[in-house]
Image (cartoon, rainbow, N blue to C red):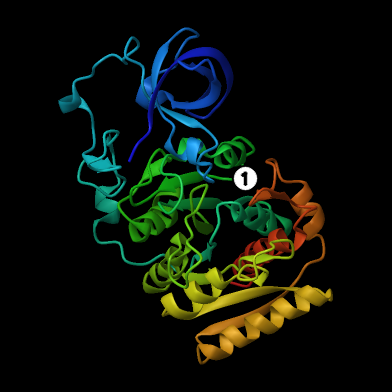
Amino acid sequence: MIQWRQAVITEVESRWAGAVTYAAQLASGDTVRALGYVENVGDLPVGARVLLNTTALERGLGTGGFAIIVAAPDHVPAPVDVAEVAGHLVKARYTPVQTMVLGVDEQQSPQHELLRDADDVAGMPVVVADLHSALPAVIAGIRASLPEATVAYVMTDGGALPADFSRTVAGLRDAEWLAACITVGQAYGGDLEAVNVHTGLLAAHLVVGADVAVVAQGPGNLGTGTRWGFSGTSAGEAVNAAGVLGGRPIASLRVSEADQRPRHRGLSHHSATAYGRVALVPADLPVPQLTEDLALYVRSQARALCDSTGGRLRLVDVDCAGLDDALRAAPVPLSTMGRSLDDDRLSFIAAAVGGRHAASLLTSR
């Protein structure tokens, strides 16, 4: 179901990439924070009447920090001749906000011939992570050892679908930490669009010229507290894609020292399931080389995970010297599940060692 509300824009609050946040007053007199995507609804002025989707907001869900602006009846963007628009990939398909984009891999793309028979990423390291919050930490780890590395982000569709929702992507791109965001599956709005993770990785290698690709879902994720009911299973599928295409899969661990849920404290069951059960190809499993009790416990959990796969997963101990400074130098705030670097250091260190290991593979070629 969808909870519809009508409102009037009373203030323009902030903007980044193609997203704008507003204060919007409901008919009840209450004010809510509303999120509008310029490509969908235009850049709206104070006083604009808007139609909101407030379902997740009113339910208090993790995805409900904003009411979402669906339409502004008095400010409909000017029509275009869609027959003249390049591209025919439709994303968010068969929803009221389905959008048409030019896919890097489709027939009208200038890169179509380059990608048509492409089948190999030539050993490119591919760091896979469960949560979007790992992205800046992974790149910090890469840059701590190899600051000149070209990094592409392949954004999957387990969380937010519009790339413009991510302040992290916008900030990393502005700081030149990120060469390109490639949106795959139903996700859209990246620098490049691709049908799936496979063509996304091929585009990262052949079109962007990336030294390293990072694959993770957009902001937000879905979990049900069950063994299999979480969107992070896609991390295992991304490992498979990287391996099939001749890349070097690196399974970045989701770890926490602050999460109160037993299934996520230490090594998260998401990582254990995605890499231990969903992934089927060989991959490296980097772990922080630290002496704290919980870090040692995580290493023992990672060792058990590797052993359970009969050697398919290879445990790699990674030195952490300098990673704290590298993380603090990130050009975007570090936050995972509402926790900062100081709140949950081990979470970000575990992601950063995935990046540092990727850099080591590049320098050892």
Q: Which of the 4 image quarters holds residue 290? A: bottom right
Q: Which residue is at the far left?
A: 83
Crowd around label 1: few <14 · some 14–19 · many ≥20 (10 Å) = many
Q: Position of residue 78 (x, y in %)?
A: 28, 13
The kind of secondary structure element at disc 1 is loop
Measuring 70% from the left and 42% from the top, which residue is drawn there?
333
Q: Position of residue 272 (x, y in %)?
A: 54, 76
Left or right, 240 with reference to 338: left
Q: Which residue is mark 1?
A: 177
Looking at the picture, tell me which residue is in the foreground, 23 or 134.
23
Q: Position of residue 122 (x, y in %)?
A: 43, 68
Looking at the picture, tell me which residue is in the foreground, 98 or 229.
229
Q: Position of residue 143 (x, y in %)?
A: 68, 54
Tell me the kind of residue under disc 1.
Answer: Trp
Q: Is residue 203 above or below residue 256?
A: above
Q: Is residue 165 above or below residue 299?
A: above
Measuring 43% from the left and 70% from the top, which residue is drawn there?
228
- Please identify the quadrant where the C terminus is shown: bottom right
Report if residue 109 is visible in the image. Answer: no
Looking at the picture, tell me which residue is in the foreground, 362 or 183.
183
Measuring 47% from the left and 7% from the top, which residue is drawn there?
47
- Please identify the quadrant where the N terminus is shown: top left
Q: Is residue 264 above or below residue 331?
A: below
Q: Which residue is at the far top?
A: 47
Report if residue 278 is visible in the image. Answer: yes
Q: Which residue is at the far front?
A: 28
